[in-house]
Amino acid sequence: MSRTHRIVHETTYRYSDVVSSCYGRAWLQPRELDGQHVHTHSLVVDPAPVDLSTGRDVHGNETTYYQVARPSTQLVVRGESLVSVETPVHDPAATALPWERARPGGVPGRTAQDFVLDQLTPEVAEGVRAWAGATFAPRRPVGEVVDELLHRIHTDFAYRSGSTSVRTTLAEVLERREGVCQDFARLAVASLRVHGLAGRYVSGYLATAPPPGRERVVGADATHAWAALRLPSGSWLGFDPTNDHRTDDRYTTLAWGRDYHDVPPLRGIVYTDAATSTMTVSVDVAPAEPPGVSRATRGGPTGAAPGPRRTVARPSGPTRTTENQEPDPRA
């Protein structure tokens, strides 16, 4: 299966006093991957920046640096992308291997070792090992391990919007038995790492449908977070414990890292004497057609561009997403 999504992500910061200048970094361009094609992407900063440049971070994520020198009391950063995504297909033989075989080693696993390491604030702790241990029975197929792990997180922990922040520790999540998608992705990743497996924290978007009988509300979506495990074959298996299933063509990958702090949507510094500030985020993930395909011709050739053009079967039950909280970039 394949879907195309038009994604608009707009963040507005308002300050009680003038900001003389600011600079920041954005992780708002989806990755170009096997099974994910970025047709177009644009990033607009208002006030207009005096410097705008793009590059890649240590994990290969596309990032944009901007510097604004015009005094203002408001900063708006808007990213817009058109992306086609296919549902991943994994070799059944790879997911049937014992999970111990997925531990990265030798030259082929060298680049994955970074995703086995703990964070500066330790999260691979005995509390995680004690909770997750029952899932990792010796020589159990790695696909079964992933499916049980995501299901246990979904059933053992309550989803409560606003119950945690980016500063909440996994120990607190384990104690409270509640959280949001960021927390559940972090718990999944830590459960893999405590057993010597490579786990990625993935930031992106999840296309959702309105409740039956209701229209789509533009801007009511949010960024989302999930986890990915490196399989013995070297490929990565994405899974979403918040919604109790593996990733499919509804998931658009923005960036991945070892934790949220590697891939926040926005990070930066402002120079101001403002005593207060506010932040509002609007995210819209809408169904779209690939370039060159109209509804009348759908099913024919897509005519998709070879790369991004840049100007600097659905599970039952509710689908949950949570805005990856973007810290106020005040100095």
Image (tube, rainbow, N blue to C red):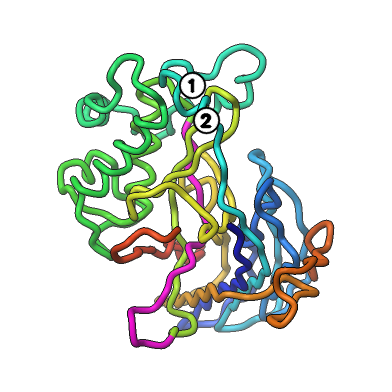
Name above or below for residue 260 compared with residue 301: above
Looking at the picture, how far across and down is residue 209, in whole percent? 42, 74
- Nearer the N terminus, badge 1 or badge 2? 1
| 75 sits left or right of 214 in the view | right
Name above or below for residue 85 compared with residue 156: below
State the residue at coordinates (50%, 47%): 202
Q: Secondary structure at mark 2?
A: strand
| 309 sits left or right of 126 in the view | right
Residue range (magenta): 199-215
Q: Quadrant of residue 67?
A: bottom right
What residue type is disc 2 on?
Answer: Arg
Looking at the picture, how far across and down is residue 304, in whole percent? 80, 64
Looking at the picture, how far across and down is residue 152, in whole percent? 24, 41
Which residue bears the numbered disc 2? 230
Q: Quadrant of residue 90?
A: top right
What residue type is disc 1 on?
Answer: Ala
State the residue at coordinates (34%, 33%): 123
| 301 sits left or right of 84 in the view | right
The label shown at residue 216 is: none
State the residue at coordinates (41%, 26%): 142
| 7 sits left or right of 321 in the view | right
Residue 208 magenta? yes
Query: Quarter holding the N terminus?
Result: bottom right
Which residue bears the numbered disc 1? 102
